[in-house]
Amino acid sequence: MTAPAVAVRDLTVTIDGRRLLSVPEASVLGGEWLGVIGPNGAGKTTLLRCIAGRCTYEGSVQLGGLEASELAARERARRVAVVPQHPVFPPGMAVSDYVMLGRTPHIGLFAFEKPSDHAAVDAVLGQLELTDLAERPINTLSGGERQRAVIARALAQDPSVLLLDEPTAALDLGHQHEVLSLVDGLRLTHGLAVISALHDLTLAAQYAERFLLLHRGEVVASGGAASVLIPELLESCYGTPVSVLDHHDTIVIVPPRPGRPRARPPAIR
């Protein structure tokens, strides 16, 4: 039986005596998309940081059946790539050089890029339709182009797990779907395990297969849309009434306008 790409058990994060996160159990198989949802301060980013090895925690995080805390930082970086909410773009750095940074875990200390590293970068640039922009300074690109470059850098790591922390926060509607559709296609073709933290619940519902709903650092619910994306649970976490609508096989989650009655949600299929 194949081990999950990510398996979390009895995970807790405590800072200055305050428990910020408690996740008894969660797992993601290769090729699955887990949406981590919840209001601000729920612990979404903290969970992603634990999986990426960027946060001190108690409990177990396994990557492909191996205890992540026992892996060298370079080996962990080969397995897990992160698309952060606020990526840093070095001024004047060419797109191809930025994407090459993703190959760092595969390049030895004081070593230089090998032909295989350049081939990997060229392949990713082509895959994300960035080849024509390879020599452009990354800070001159549009928001959607820069976000594709960030994903290209992550994919250049050749990871088995892709972590997305609010990857569409600064993008318009068209670029939001462009980026997430791209990730979805790569998930299916490469067998990537994708874990994303998204504020937009409708957007999350269109791409994630399963959900982990967090509130105040605790797991409120986990599972498919039918068991997690229901008004009572969402209202208790977000503190506002919501309607969950099934519109042409797309789940739409909206708060009602003040003074208007809430729409009666149909059953989620």
Image: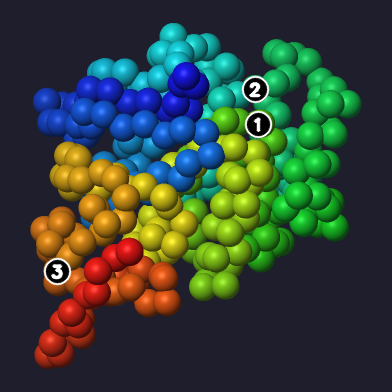
How packed mark 1 is, by other alpha carbons closer than 10 Å (few <14, some 14-19, many 20 or more), is many
- Report which residue position mark 2 lands on: 105
Disc on the earlier residue, 1 or 3: 1
Could you tell me how far apart the alpha carbons at marks 1 and 3 are, in whole angstroms? 40 Å
Please tell me which residue lies in front, 237 or 105.
237
How packed mark 2 is, by other alpha carbons closer than 10 Å (few <14, some 14-19, many 20 or more), is some
* Camera-nearest label, 2 or 3: 3
Q: Which mark is residue 168?
A: none
Percent position of residue 250, x then y:
41, 70
Query: Does the rendering let one see residue 197?
Result: no
Residue at the image point whose x is 83% and y is 53% from the top = 131
Q: Which mark is residue 157?
A: 1
Q: Quadrant of the C terminus?
A: bottom left
Residue at the image point whose x is 48% and y is 41% from the top = 32
Q: Secondary structure under badge 2? A: helix
Task: Examine the image and state in which quarter residue 257 appears.
Answer: bottom left
Mark 2: amino acid:
Pro
258 is higher (above) or lower (below) than 7: below
Could you tell me how far apart the alpha carbons at marks 2 and 3 are, in whole angstroms? 44 Å
Percent position of residue 135, x then y:
84, 51
- Report which residue position mark 3 lands on: 240
Mark 1: amino acid:
Gln
Q: Is 50 left or right of 147, judged from the image as shown?
A: left
Could you tell me how far apart the alpha carbons at marks 1 and 2 are, in whole angstroms? 7 Å
| Discs 1, 2 touching: Cβ within 8 Å | yes
Percent position of residue 30, x then y:
52, 33
158 is higher (above) or lower (below) than 89: above
Mark 3: amino acid:
Thr
Query: Does the rendering let one see residue 254?
Result: yes
Task: Examine the image and state in which quarter residue 129 appears.
Answer: bottom right
| Discs 1, 3 touching: Cβ within 8 Å | no
